[in-house]
Amino acid sequence: MFNPNKITKILGATFILVSSNAALAATAPGTVSVTVQNTFNLTETQVLDFGTIRAQNDNTNVANFASLIITPNGTATPSITSASIGASTITSLSTPTMAIFTVDSAAPFTDLEVTFPPNFTLITTGVPANAAVFNILNASWKGYIIGGTDDGTTITDGGFMETDSTGAVVLQVGTSLDTDILGATTTSGYVDQAYTGTYTMTVDY
């Protein structure tokens, strides 16, 4: 026999069950975080030093100049090449040192672009304004990579070096020291004292 009360009880029980399950849901706020580190450390750990030299410039022809070339390589001592044209002369009297730059705290296994400095001069103090100077040209720079995927590779301006698994890599750097190319506009030769110059190395992602 049809019993309407029984249907009502069943529906009521079903409704209570659904309501009970919904009451078990909970919510909570969440937080998301990210830290950006686009910077890394570039440190000069050894100074570029051409040592002690004998030097003479040629005032008769701007094409006549001498060069002392430091080539970086995998050893502690760079290779040295001297080239003289005309009356210009450079002779090394002591062992020069290549520059060494160390990168750390960069992204692992990531290419870094190396930009060598533009042309600049090395000068000294206490001499006439038109005295001979030394030149270092942008095109003469070379780097030798120590560590990372490119270990043992030589690069020039605009070259790349890849960091290792810790985000580090080392770059040995050499270049050419050239005598003055101003010719007859120089009023005196080189004097017996230190000639200095500053430059900026740039390494970037």
Image (tube, grey):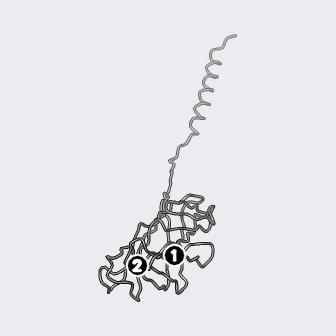
Residue 128 is drawn in which quadrant? bottom left
Q: Can you give x and y, in whole percent of width and height, for residue 135 in the image?
A: 41, 74
Q: Between residues 62 and 146, which one lies in front from this camera angle?
A: 62
Residue lying at 45% horizontally and 66% vertically, measured from the top left: 138
Residue 193 numbered tag: none
Residue 58 numbered tag: 2
Q: Between residues 72 and 203, which one lies in front from this camera angle?
A: 72
Q: Amino acid at mark 1?
A: Ala
Q: Which residue is mark 1?
A: 83
Above/below status of 189 relative to 11 = below
Task: Identify the residue at the far left of this view.
Answer: 129
Residue lying at 49% horizontally and 63% vertically, measured from the top left: 203
Q: Quadrant of the N terminus?
A: top right
Q: For the residues labelled 2 and 1, say whether their Cβ atoms are less than 8 Å apart.
A: no
Is residue 140 in view?
yes
Residue lying at 61% horizontally and 20% vertically, measured from the top left: 8
Residue 23 is drawn in which quadrant? top right
